[in-house]
């Protein structure tokens, strides 16, 4: 069972996101087991308590349960007079976790091995201490070993060297990073994560755990992922504990931890979990947010479409598909304004705003599709009304979150029938980000895959390989995130979107024009037009919301300081500064992009128009 499950864990870690559990020690502390006890001995004297903690993590949504054996090595157990029971304690810890995880292979068990005090011991003795704990955990049924909270590269090297004698046992090396993005002995993350030589065992993954809270380990992960070719597992503390009424309390909320977990996933980590202070409540929030995203990220962009029994037709020229496409094809300056559809079904105000924007020379109305997983009127219905009553073309966002491929193809054909031609394809936010956390994300495909489907329809062939007559004539747009933490992945996906048929791109709202220009330099010569997303900040509070609550948006410190200087002034004065910043952004990037998409904060199109003046 263990060997098969070990192989499956390695395969799973490389294919989809995993959620590890949280702290064991602080959970026991919360349950009134104080630090004068040997926590690991509880595997023998109170197995039901350890089982209860692990069960709470399983119920919270963890994919990986960690054994209660962090300090179950000979050196540390001697302090409690338990060293003669080392094998018994480790085997029991593994079996408790295995029993909670089950034998069906749905959950994995990590055998926790912590730090080894080395003073006064030879290298051979330390190696024997490591291997006797590893052997006991393996006998107990763990799927892999995780060497946790290692304090230096030397400590990780020592663990890896010992595992060269246990090549059949997969293991992870995880180190602690303290403030300043360094180990406890002052080693940089780049030094800690640089590849090991051939004289040690080969880990299946690397990790960051303990030492810092979510913000600190996000920063460390950003550096580690650049030098580490292996999957990265990140398990931060819940901030730093503070004393209260004789106890140590961690104050980071579950929502805070989950928000940072989302950012870590965006960076490209393979798994997230928690260390000291991270409770089942934290893991529950992380799992709610990460698991829908895991499905979205594991979706194959390549659609499993039936081979066409008919010959595909050539697509119509880009410039002939719509007025919006014509301006983009001619590389003329193009402007769109984003209006969020209402929550109800009264579109009168939306249409009046669209008419006004049309009179001011705006080229198109940008319509989000359930932004931030909110429930609003169908964007298709709103786009149709705007097109026919305001006589301005919409750019319809088309989200992969809510429907399967059959439903999405039906909507794409519906757009063609209604004359809605400008489409912006996005993968979509997981439902957890919105006010309907129990809704299910479908994610049959992502933005790349849906571009491929639309291009196929543009060539007169549907998903099933059947001819459609006439072919659709859609303008294919895609999103772009210039401030992505993983710029390489973002650029790679952008290139895939272009190969899939993208005709234009619109960026996320950008507040740092230098970051956008650097990103454009990385892309190099771009074969499709790009519109820069511009968001005029309405107030300092609005700036804080954008910085902290909107995934994929980074507001630089310089902008936050400018908004903060007017935070105590009137709303009008705060708005004036926000509009000024937006104008500066447009001026700074206008020679590098083909136009802008300006948002209308709180539905106030006057703010968008002021930014465009």
Image: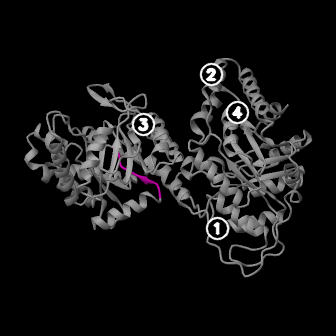
Upstream in sequence: badge 3 or badge 2: 3
| Residue corresponding to mark 3 | 189
**For residue 511, above or below residue 234:** above
Upstream in sequence: badge 3 or badge 4: 3
Look at the image and tell me in which quarter the C terminus lies: top right
> Residue 534, percent across and down?
73, 37
Upstream in sequence: badge 1 or badge 4: 1
The disc label shown at residue 405, or none: 1
Q: Residue furthest front?
A: 198
> Residue 458, percent across and down?
79, 67
| Point 42% across, 61% down: residue | 12
Of the residues tagged 1 and 4, which is closer to the observer? 4
| Point 33% across, 47% down: residue | 173
Using the rendered view, name the quadrant where residue 319 is placed: bottom right
> Residue 398, percent across and down?
70, 56
Could you tell me how far apart the alpha carbons at marks 3 and 4 are, in whole angstroms?
A: 29 Å
Q: Secondary structure at mark 3?
A: helix
| Residue corresponding to mark 2 | 561
| Residue corresponding to mark 4 | 513
> 10 Å neighbourhood of mark 1: few (<14), some, or many (≥20)?
some
Q: Along the line of sight, which residue is nearer the eye, 74 or 381?
A: 74
Q: Along the line of sight, which residue is nearer the eye, 131 or 300?
A: 131
Q: Secondary structure at mark 4?
A: helix
> 10 Å neighbourhood of mark 3: few (<14), some, or many (≥20)?
many
Indicate yes or no whether the magenta region holds residue 305: no
Do labels 1 and 4 touch, CB within 8 Å? no
Residue 341 visible from this viewpoint: no
> 10 Å neighbourhood of mark 2: few (<14), some, or many (≥20)?
few
Could you tell me how far apart the alpha carbons at marks 1 and 2 are, in whole angstroms?
A: 45 Å
Q: Which residues are magenta?
A: 16-22
């Amino acid at each position: 069972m263990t060997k098969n499950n070990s192989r499956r864990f390695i395969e799973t870690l490389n294919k989809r996101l995993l959620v590890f559990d949280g702290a064991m020690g602080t959970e026991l502390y919360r349950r009134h087991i104080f630090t004068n006890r040997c926590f690991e001995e509880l595997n023998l004297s109170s197995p039901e308590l350890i089982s209860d903690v692990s069960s709470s993590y399983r119920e919270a949504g963890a994919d990986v349960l960690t054994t209660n054996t962090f300090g179950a090595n000979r050196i540390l157990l001697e302090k409690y007079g338990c060293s003669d029971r080392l094998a018994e304690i480790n085997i029991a810890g593994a079996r408790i976790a295995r029993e909670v995880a089950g034998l069906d292979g749905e959950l994995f068990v990590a055998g926790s091995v912590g730090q080894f005090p080395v003073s006064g011991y030879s290298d051979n003795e330390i190696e024997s201490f490591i291997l006797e704990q590893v052997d006991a955990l393996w006998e107990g049924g763990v799927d892999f070993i995780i060497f946790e909270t290692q304090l230096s590269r030397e400590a990780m090297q020592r663990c890896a060297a010992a595992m060269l004698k246990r090549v059949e046992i997969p293991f992870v090396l995880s180190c602690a990073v303290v403030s300043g993005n360094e180990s406890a002995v002052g080693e940089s993350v780049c030094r800690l994560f640089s590849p090991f030589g051939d004289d040690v065992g080969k880990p299946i993954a690397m990790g960051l755990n303990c030492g810092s809270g979510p913000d600190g380990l996000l920063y460390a992960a950003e550096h580690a992922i650049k030098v580490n070719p292996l999957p990265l597992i990140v398990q931060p503390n819940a901030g730093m504990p503070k004393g209260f009424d004789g106890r140590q309390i961690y104050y980071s909320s579950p929502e805070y931890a989950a928000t940072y977990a989302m950012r870590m996933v965006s960076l490209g980590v393979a798994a997230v979990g928690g260390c000291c202070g991270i409770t089942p409540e934290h893991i529950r929030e992380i799992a709610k947010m990460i698991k829908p995203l895991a499905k979205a990220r594991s979706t194959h962009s390549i659609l499993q479409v039936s081979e066409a029994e008919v010959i595909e037709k050539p697509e119509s020229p880009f410039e002939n598909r719509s007025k919006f496409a014509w301006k983009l094809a001619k590389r003329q300056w193009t402007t769109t304004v984003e209006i969020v559809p209402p929550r109800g079904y009264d579109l009168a105000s939306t249409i009046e705003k669209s008419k006004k924007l049309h009179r001011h020379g705006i080229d198109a109305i940008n319509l989000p599709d359930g932004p931030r997983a909110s429930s609003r009127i169908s964007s298709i219905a709103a786009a149709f009304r705007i097109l026919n009553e305001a006589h301005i073309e919409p750019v319809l966002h088309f989200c992969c979150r809510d429907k399967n491929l059959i439903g999405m193809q039906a909507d794409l054909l519906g757009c063609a029938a209604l004359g809605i031609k400008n489409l912006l394809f996005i993968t979509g936010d997981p439902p957890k980000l919105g006010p309907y956390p129990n809704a299910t994300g479908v994610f049959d495909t992502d933005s790349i895959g849906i571009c491929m489907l639309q291009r196929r329809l543009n060539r007169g062939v549907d998903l099933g390989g059947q001819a459609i007559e006439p072919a659709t004539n859609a303008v294919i747009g895609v999103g772009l995130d210039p401030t992505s933490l993983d710029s390489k992945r973002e650029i790679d996906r952008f290139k895939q979107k272009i190969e899939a048929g993208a005709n234009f791109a619109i960026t996320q709202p950008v507040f740092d024009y230098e970051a956008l220009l650097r990103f454009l330099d990385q892309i190099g010569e771009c074969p499709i037009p790009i519109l820069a997303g511009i968001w005029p900040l309405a107030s300092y509070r609005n700036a804080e919301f954008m910085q902290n609550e909107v995934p994929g948006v980074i507001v630089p410190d310089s902008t936050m300081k400018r908004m903060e200087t007017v935070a105590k002034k009137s709303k009008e004065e705060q708005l004036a500064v926000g509009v000024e910043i937006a104008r500066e952004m447009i001026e700074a990037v206008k020679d590098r992009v083909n136009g802008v998409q300006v948002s209308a904060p709180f539905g106030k199109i006057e703010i968008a128009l002021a930014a465009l003046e």
